[in-house]
Amino acid sequence: MFRQREGSPFRGLAVVALKEAADHMTSMRVHLVMLLILLTALGSVYAAIGQIKETVGEDAFLFLRLFTTAREPLPSFVAFLGFLLPLVAIALGFDSINGEYNRRTLPRVLSQPIYRDALLTGKFVGGLIIIGMCLLVLWLLMTGLGILLLGLPPSGEEVLRGIAYLFAAFAYAGVWLAVALLFSTLFRTPATSALATLTVWLLMTVFWSMLAPLLAGVLAPIDPLDPMTAVHQVEVQQAIARISPNVLYGEMTLGLLHPETRTFGLLFPSQVSQALMGAPLPVSQSLMLIWPQLSSMIAAFLVLFTIAYVSFQRQEIRP
Amino acid sequence: MSVVIETKGLVKRYRGHVAVNGVDLTIERGEVFGLLGPNGSGKTTTILLLLGLTEPSGGTVSVLGLNPLRDPLSVKQRVAFLPDQVGFYDQLTARENLVYTARLAGIESGMAHRRIDESLARVRLEAVADRRVGTFSRGMRQRLGIAEIILKQPEIAILDEPTSGLDPQSTHELLTLIGDLARGGMTIVLSSHLLDMVQSICNRVALFNRGKIGLCGPVETLMGDVMGGTHTVEVDAAGIDLKEILAGKPHVMRVRQDRQNNWRVDTDADVRPEIARHIIAAGGELRRMSIRQTSLDDVYVRYFEEAANVQAA
């Protein structure tokens, strides 16, 4: 049956988003996670600068090395973010909808002249605002530290690549926020939804890279007489691995912050016959390289949000 | 008088069970209307259907001439709702909670601040306006809920179990506030299982039973219909059959024997002297007699007793 609703679904969206963002800003939980991120970021940059000073003679993209250089025992800044951004997103989102149920605020808020859409989207946008601010602050902090401690300003291309990386990291965190939001609509207990989200996070960050080769071995076994089957298996394995947002994030960082990256897959000698090994790609080419990763990340985020949306629209308001 | 809420054949089914089963309601402007019934009889579901917060499985709802499903924003703009055990954001102060509501309701900010001060004063929470709601007692939260209604200035206020879980003092305060709202011309719909409260402030009540309205009308009429009288005389006497003696006597509506030598007589006037006289005249031994006015409690108990008997039969 076709029925048209009157009024805008966006009414109240900005109010909800700003209130959520303000709540996050004052919440102890978010303070703790931010503190953790800030400390690790400072630590990894400091280590990277030490490493750069010791080893690098000439590098056209010295500034980007700040983000990607690791010094034992610390991982690089981007690796840290790949690990911690999901945690921030989960901390922001895991109790957003079921929290309203448990505080019994949902009927009261929904009896105001807004649609449910505004509440869900507003909560999502509120979370994104916080993630965006957190990333921007980190990025500026890194750049500032780099200028101060290395004594060299970033080039225009490095700034461009940095901004592109910022956006990629934002999309990556957005996916995890969508996961957290989805579980917060599916489970009524915040503890359950937090555990479910953390489980998915662990599976994707830690175990997925172990599972992908196993699955590929089952799905595309190697025939010792046909070398192409080996290539096929590698391709299948890569496709499976890319289900994990972490793998996509890793590839995007690689493509953006290591300008000499030409491909993420297998490279045959015929394909690089005329190439200058180690020569950097222009920004536009690097962007084209990571485009599929970025768009699949955004697609994943949209799909997750849609599922959360549908399940929230169908939920009864009574606990 | 104009009709502000009208439902016809309202049905709501949750997976396999029927919560509301054909409810016809008509509520007029300025009324204080009570939805009465035991827990699980469909009161809250009916309220959610009125607000468009849940979709009916059948039937129609019209609130202020609008369909809450087609035009929910206009309905929710003009109708305020105080849910059962209302929740507020504990980490925010009372004032911040109201500011959020005012923004969601689209009240312009200068006016909102004025109205918030005014409504907090009316529910006597101005002293704690800047304290976190987390520190509030149940009664204070409920009063804050009333402040939210005052702030929104709706045409209809729907209150779901507004006094459940409150101590007598807070209940009294809340009822006074609700009475004030009603005197201000607001139409009020409230659900409750606390009958004396409904009796004290409602013009009309509807008795819910298993998703249906069993009885509907002004409180006095219901008493007449269900109880057959306005007074109940309790008699302890020996050596007679009171039922026989009082059969067909004026003002006596019904006689029931509760225990051996103990009867309850429903009457529509104070006829204790007559009853005493009849007992003595029949040679009976009158031991005790007491009278009380029937309350809605009796109606309620009696009605559901009968409903259960019908079910069992």
Image: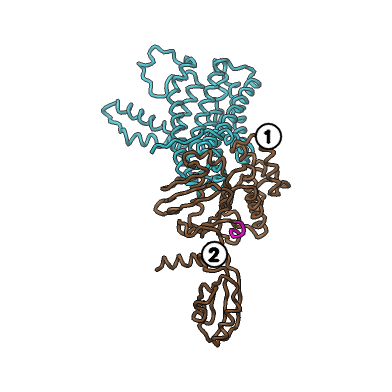
Q: Mark 2 — on which chain does it sit?
A: B
Q: Colour of chain B?
A: brown
In this view, the residue in front, B237 or B86, is B237
Q: Which residue is found at the position 53% from the left and 74% from the top? A: B252
Dot 1 lies on which element? helix
Q: Which residues are magenta?
A: B197-201
Tell me, for residue B110, which label it has, or none.
1
The answer to whether any part of residue A99 appears in the image is no
Answer with left or right where residue A256 lies relative to residue B180: left
Q: Quadrant of residue B283?
A: bottom right
Name the disc covering residue B223, or none. 2
x, y percent for residue B265 = 54, 75
Which of these two is toward me, A205 or B99? B99
B55 over A158 or under it: above or below: below
Front residue of B147 and A122? B147
Same chain, labels 1 and 2: yes
Q: Is residue A16 left or right of residue A179?
A: right
